[in-house]
Image: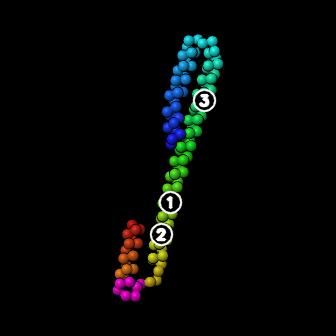
Amino acid sequence: MALEAEITQNKVCLNTLNSAGNQMINDRHYATPEIQTILGHVNSQWERLDDKAKDKGKKLREASQQELFYRALEDANAKLAEMEKLVSSDDVGHDLRSCRALLNKHQVCQCGTL
């Protein structure tokens, strides 16, 4: 998902921010408590954003799989209806040509169910 990729790419910016903030804390900057609070808040927001993006991506992939499944199911139902119509027909042909045509359809139907 594009959003997940973008978040991953922007992780570098977060790491840079954390490095700069931690360096200021290690240097005993006068605003160390505030820097720690801000870093904690930003990292917490980042984790929430990352989790939400991953969850959204998972749901979208699942929805795509579900849609593919439903399409395959519709195709199978259509094929079954076609086969049902073929085997339910009382038509046995009226001459050699029509008998062979029906036999070919029946054989194709059988091959499709195997």
- At x 50%, y 28%, the residue is 12
Q: Amino acid at mark 1?
A: Arg
Range shown magenta: 92-98
Q: Which mark is residue 44?
A: 3
- Helix or strand or loop: what does disc 2 sit on? helix
Q: Is residue 95 magenta?
A: yes
- Where residue 36 sits, quadrant-wise, is top right
x then y, percent, for residue 38: 62, 23
Q: Which mark is residue 71?
A: 1
x then y, percent, for residue 63: 54, 51
C-alpha gap between disc 3 and disc 2: 53 Å
- Helix or strand or loop: what does disc 1 sit on? helix
Query: Where 68 sits versus 81, above or below?
Result: above
Q: Which mark is residue 80?
A: 2
x then y, percent, for residue 23: 54, 16
- At x 52%, y 38%, the residue is 4
Left of 51 or right of it: where is 76? Answer: left
* Front label number (3 vs 2): 3
Q: Which of marks 1 and 2 precedes in the sequence?
A: 1
Q: Quadrant of the C terminus?
A: bottom left
Q: Amino acid at mark 3?
A: Ser
C-alpha gap between disc 2 and disc 1: 14 Å
C-alpha gap between disc 1 and disc 3: 41 Å
Q: Is residue 86 magenta?
A: no
